[in-house]
Image (spheres, rainbow, N blue to C red):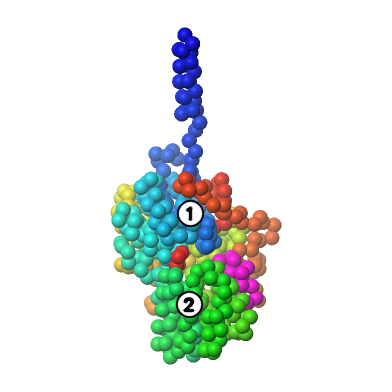
């Protein structure tokens, strides 16, 4: 009898252990539809690591768009369920988490990455699985050459490098340029090459080419060589993480020439790191938050209300990418990879925050570019440059702030009375995603 009672007790305890506790939800789920009605979508990015602000800003843009989509009825009545993975700013992790999103979470589409090196590591996996992927911000031309399931919402480095060369030669009247390249970064190497080719075609001379690697902190030797070459401008196609230190050390060595860069400079931490040393510097970018366009104004207001800061270009591109994906899903005959890919490719004249987007045969959009200037401690819009077939570039007043007059603050600065954007904690490796409802975030290696 005692044995029987003991057996019953053991069975009861085992049942309680197995069934008594509800399972933990590891994905970001918005809306109220049951799990069987939800459409799984994957996002991967650098939520932690050396370029964490890239992933955090992108995540913010994705979640803002996804919540709006679900609030409006989702995809033909079905809610989107977001699985988010942190690749820790590492290409090898990007490949690993994308494999997990596809094989374990069963996502039908992917958003990410920002950095081209990480996108190049992960994209072949999506291509092989026939899962469409939209990179919001990877500008290296090789990204979409991986296959017909890979798209991007940003301009290419070939256009960005050519535009900055024209800006240097035509607007700054530069004849001699020095280039400081991150040799371990696909983005930096490619952008440096495109700038140099275009600058020379415009009659300019590259008088010095120096290199460094991501994570370096001492650039004095390279900058001393640059100083000896007496350039008119110094092109630094790297990330904000090193650019700020390069600017400080350049000024310490007496280099007063303008520093030029690409969209890898874009981060709320740029001015925090470089401070006054960046005064008079310029970089290319995807949009300006002071654009009077109603689409931009609405996005900026919603983003600032939710996250407490002005949206940078990474969050805007992520927002556009997510909306483009959702529109394609609505048109798709079935919600699977091939059908979604077909409809993304048919995207024509989509009016986004970062411009009007049409995908051509290469799955790359033709878009305008803005040149931003660091002036009086703020990042302001200098001018807009348009590709062939679009209206001619229109110069913008150099005093126009990138923020609205009411804001009066640079990127990343919370408006009066708001709370600072929450910091991002490292995501547990066992968790396939992060939930904004539980831990809202302010939201490679080449862009």
Instruction: Name the residue at 39% across, 46% down.
Output: 105
Relative to 349, is 224 above or below? below
The label shown at residue 211 is 2
Residue 255: image location, x then y, percent: 59, 84
Question: Could you classify mark 2 by the number of other residues whose Cα lies within 10 Å: few (under 14), some (14-19), or many (20 or more)?
Answer: some
Asked if residue 316 lies left or right of residue 363, the reply is right
- Earlier along the polypeptide chain: callout 1 or callout 2? 1
Asked if residue 126 lies left or right of residue 187, the reply is left
Residue 48: image location, x then y, percent: 53, 57
Over which residues does the magenta segment extend? 266-281
Identify the element where label 1 is drawn: strand
Q: Which residue is mark 1?
A: 86
Question: Could you classify mark 1 by the number of other residues whose Cα lies within 10 Å: few (under 14), some (14-19), or many (20 or more)?
Answer: many
Identify the element where label 2 is drawn: strand
Asked if residue 324 lies left or right of residue 399, the reply is left
Q: How many labels were placed on the picture?
A: 2
Relative to 383, is 60 above or below? above
Instruction: Name the residue at 41% across, 79% down.
Output: 193
Residue 354: image location, x then y, percent: 48, 66
The verdict on residue 285 being magenta is no
Question: Visible in this render: residue 317?
Answer: yes
Foreground residue, 89 or 171? 89
Question: Visible in this render: residue 111?
Answer: no
Instruction: State which mark lies toward you, 1 or 2.
Output: 2
Instruction: Name the residue at 61% across, 60% down.
Output: 309
The label shown at residue 25 is none
Residue 407 image-quadrant placement: bottom right
């Amino acid at each position: 009898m005692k044995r029987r009672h003991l057996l019953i007790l053991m069975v009861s305890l085992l049942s309680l252990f197995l069934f008594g506790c509800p399972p933990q939800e590891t994905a970001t789920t918005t809306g109220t539809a049951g799990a069987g009605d939800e459409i799984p979508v994957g996002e991967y990015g650098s939520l932690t690591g050396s370029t964490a602000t890239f992933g955090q800003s992108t995540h913010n843009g994705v979640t803002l768009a996804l919540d709006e989509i679900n609030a409006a009825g989702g995809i033909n009545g079905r809610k989107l369920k977001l699985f988010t993975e942190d690749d820790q700013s590492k290409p090898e992790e990007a490949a690993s988490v994308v494999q997990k999103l596809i094989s374990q979470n069963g996502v039908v589409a992917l958003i990410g990455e920002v950095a081209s090196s990480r996108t190049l590591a992960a994209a072949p996996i999506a291509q092989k699985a026939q899962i469409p992927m939209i990179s919001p911000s990877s500008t290296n031309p090789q990204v979409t050459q991986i296959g017909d399931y890979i798209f991007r919402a940003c301009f290419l480095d070939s256009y960005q490098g050519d535009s900055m060369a024209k800006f240097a030669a035509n607007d700054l009247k530069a004849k001699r340029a020095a280039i400081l390249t991150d040799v371990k970064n696909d983005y930096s190497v490619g952008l440096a090459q495109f700038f140099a080719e275009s600058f020379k075609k415009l009659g300019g001379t590259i008088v010095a080419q120096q290199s460094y690697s991501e994570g370096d902190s001492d650039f004095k030797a390279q900058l001393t060589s640059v100083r000896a070459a007496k350039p008119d401008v110094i092109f630094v196609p790297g990330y904000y993480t090193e650019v700020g230190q390069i600017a400080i050390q350049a000024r310490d060595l007496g280099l007063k020439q303008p520093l030029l860069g690409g969209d890898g400079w874009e981060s709320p931490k740029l001015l925090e790191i470089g401070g006054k040393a960046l005064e008079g510097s310029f970089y290319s970018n995807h949009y300006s938050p002071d654009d009077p366009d109603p689409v931009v104004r609405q996005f900026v207001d919603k983003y600032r209300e939710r996250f407490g800061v002005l949206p940078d270009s990474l969050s805007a591109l992520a927002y556009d990418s997510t909306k483009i994906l959702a529109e394609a899903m609505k048109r798709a005959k079935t919600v699977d990879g091939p059908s979604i890919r077909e409809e993304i490719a048919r995207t024509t004249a989509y009016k986004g925050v970062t411009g009007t987007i049409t995908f051509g045969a290469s799955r790359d959009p033709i878009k305008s570019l803005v040149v931003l200037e660091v002036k009086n401690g703020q990042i302001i819009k200098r001018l807009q440059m348009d590709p062939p077939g679009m209206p001619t570039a229109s110069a913008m007043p150099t005093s126009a702030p990138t923020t609205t007059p009411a804001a009066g603050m640079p990127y990343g600065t919370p408006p009066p009375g708001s709370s600072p954007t929450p910091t991002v904690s490292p995501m547990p490796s066992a968790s396939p995603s992060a939930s904004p409802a539980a831990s809202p975030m302010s939201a490679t290696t080449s862009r």
